[in-house]
Image (tube, rainbow, N blue to C red):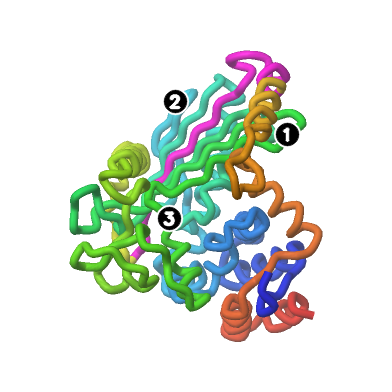
Amino acid sequence: MSEEYRRFDHGRLRDFVAAAYKRLGLPSEDAVIAAEVMVHGDLMGIDSHGVAHLGTHFGYAPGLRNGTIKANPQIRVVHETPSTALIDGDGGLGLVVAHRAMEIAIAKAAQVGVGAVAVTNSRHYGAALHYAMMALPHDMIGISMTNTVPSVLPTFGRERMLGTNPISVAAPAGQEPPFLLDMATSVVAGGKLELARRKGELIPFGWAVDKDGKPTNDPFVTRQGGGLLPLGSTPELSSYKGYGLAVLVDILCGVLSGMGYSTMLSRTTGEMGHFFAAFRIDAFRPAADFKAMMDEMMRALRATPPVEGAERVLVPGEKEAEAERERLAKGIPLHPDVVSSLGKLALEIDIQAEFQALIS
């Protein structure tokens, strides 16, 4: 960890973020939910989708202040069956809308075995993995995905037509950490470019192309008419797979919900659609048996002999579990620019005392 980073206790960080959301107009319960979602992202090492999103130019606080995000939306069920629902987020903070929607999916799964919820008229919801993981304490498998404004080129295309459209899946194990899949359908999430810009670093070739379709390592490329590449990067490396997955997310989050696919979304308002699902394991087989087999599979994967030069084989979710243990013990590392943005926000919305409590 670079010396310029500073670590913060996750509880203090959560309290500060909750205080900020309350001052920005969110009801107390929603403010706490939003803070927990953001800090959980940082705890798992998903720094591109943690508290850094609160006070930045494109973050949640500016949206709440200019009205493109509603602080107190009327989230409602538009239509439902015993196993499905369509939710209208009423332009509310995606962190809260998504949390409510996943709660509904879990409740339906508890009743009938499977719950699926599509969401329209929401906003950016942070780390997709958080909502999938909400299913784990209930012995359920969770799925979370969202579409986003276009920043990704389809295979063989020169125009941005797709969002980074992430997919996340969480499945419980017994003694082993849970299986956690958290992936953009582009080569990397857009937040990775933001991190590179913040650190003053170049990005690897293969992540993006410029406005002429040429490979670039410039992290500002998406602000200059260029775009990210689908997962796989090039046709020779099967980028059509990432392209297809991105379209799948658009179908479930945009077409199924009625929100619209990526090119129909507004950059000005930041509107998005989401999709969530929960599967109650004991609707298929005893949960204890499932988790025992999950343990066996995870251990078998971890025992795979590593290639020369590699220290070990990780299982999906192990990296996040290790990051969470380390950050719970030592604190969450924040870049000075992030700390500065939080301090600036605290001054603007008059919560300097809460900021001083955070940094003291």
User: Is there CB contact under 8 Å for labels 2 and 1?
Assistant: no
Label 2: element kind:
loop
In the image: residue 167, left or right of residue 248: right
**Numbered circle sitting on residue 188:** 3
**Identity, as a three-letter code, of the amino acid under mark 3:** Val
Label 1: element kind:
loop
Q: Nearer the viewer, mark 3 or mark 2?
A: 3
Circle 2 sits on which residue?
81
Circle 1 sits on which residue?
176
Identify the residue at image location x=20%, y=58%. 159
In the image: residue 287, left or right of residue 166: right
Residue 209 drawn in magenta: no
Magenta segment boundaries in residue numbering: 269-291
Residue 277 drawn in magenta: yes
Give whichever of 345, 47 is nearer the camera. 47
In primary-sequence order, the first of circles 3 and 2 is 2
Q: Is residue 250 visible?
A: no
As displayed, is residue 149 above or below residue 6? Answer: above
As displayed, is residue 147 above or below residue 304? Answer: below
In primary-sequence order, the first of circles 2 and 1 is 2
Give whichever of 231, 135 is nearer the camera. 231
